[in-house]
Image (spheres, helix red, strand yellow):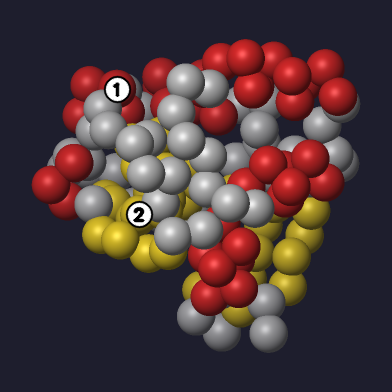
Amino acid sequence: MATIDRNEAPSRDEVEVFLKAVDFSLPVGFLDFFKETNGADISNDEGYFLLWPLTDMFQLNQDYNVAEYAPEFFVFGSDGGDTAYAIEKISGSIYEMPFIGMSNEEAIFKSKTFTDFIESM
């Protein structure tokens, strides 16, 4: 069973700013989750997962040069180490990939929906 430590929810304005910047498919359940929490720490027997604050995602994608190294993806979190969790922009599916050596070719499919992704944790 996963333990989810949620941040305070983003404001309606912060959600609107995020949605105006999104030009790709979001996974089913993604927006519902992030309207309730501006990021979260999730831990279970399998490991640790850090879901970035909605308000920081675009800046963090820029900081990690995601558009340069894996332009078909948008990163939304990590395992707190070397693994990134990302949305495939065209499909809205969720993948994992390494931060070092990040590329479209290194992406591994995890889930079709954000809801399934969270439940698989």
The residue most toward the left is 105
Q: Secondary structure at mark 2?
A: strand
- Answer left or right for 82 relative to 78: left
The N terminus lies in which quarter of the figure?
bottom right
Q: Determine contact: label 1, label 2, CB under 8 Å.
A: no
Residue 35: give x, y in percent of width and height. 79, 40
Quadrant in which residue 48 is drawn: bottom right
Q: Position of residue 9 (x, y in %)?
A: 85, 39
Q: Quadrant of residue 114?
A: bottom right
Relative to residue 100, is residue 94 depicted above or below?
A: below
Side of 54 where 116 appears, left or right: left
How many residues crowd mark 2 within 10 Å: few (<14), some (14–19), many (20+)? many
Disc nearer the start of the sequence (1/2): 1
Give the residue at x 79% y 53%.
6
Residue type of the residue flagged with mark 2: Tyr
Secondary structure at badge 1 equals helix
Residue type at mark 1 is: Ala
Characterize the local packing of mark 1: few (<14), some (14-19) or many (20 or more) Cα atoms within 10 angstroms. some
Residue plotted at (86% across, 26% down): 11
Instruction: Quickly name the residue at label 2.
Output: 95
Q: Is residue 17 visible?
A: yes
Distance of label 1 from label 2 (alpha carbons): 15 Å
At horizontal 52% and vertical 65% (from top left) the residue drawn is 117
Residue at x 62%, y 47% (from the top left corner): 30
Q: Quadrant of residue 91?
A: top left
* Residue 20 image offset from top left, x and y in percent: 62, 14
The front one of 53 and 31 is 31
Q: Position of residue 44 (x, y in %)?
A: 61, 78
The mark tally for this picture is 2
- Residue position for label 1: 67
| Residue 3 vertical position relative to residue 112 in the rendered view, above or below | below
The quadrant of the image that shows the C terminus is: bottom right
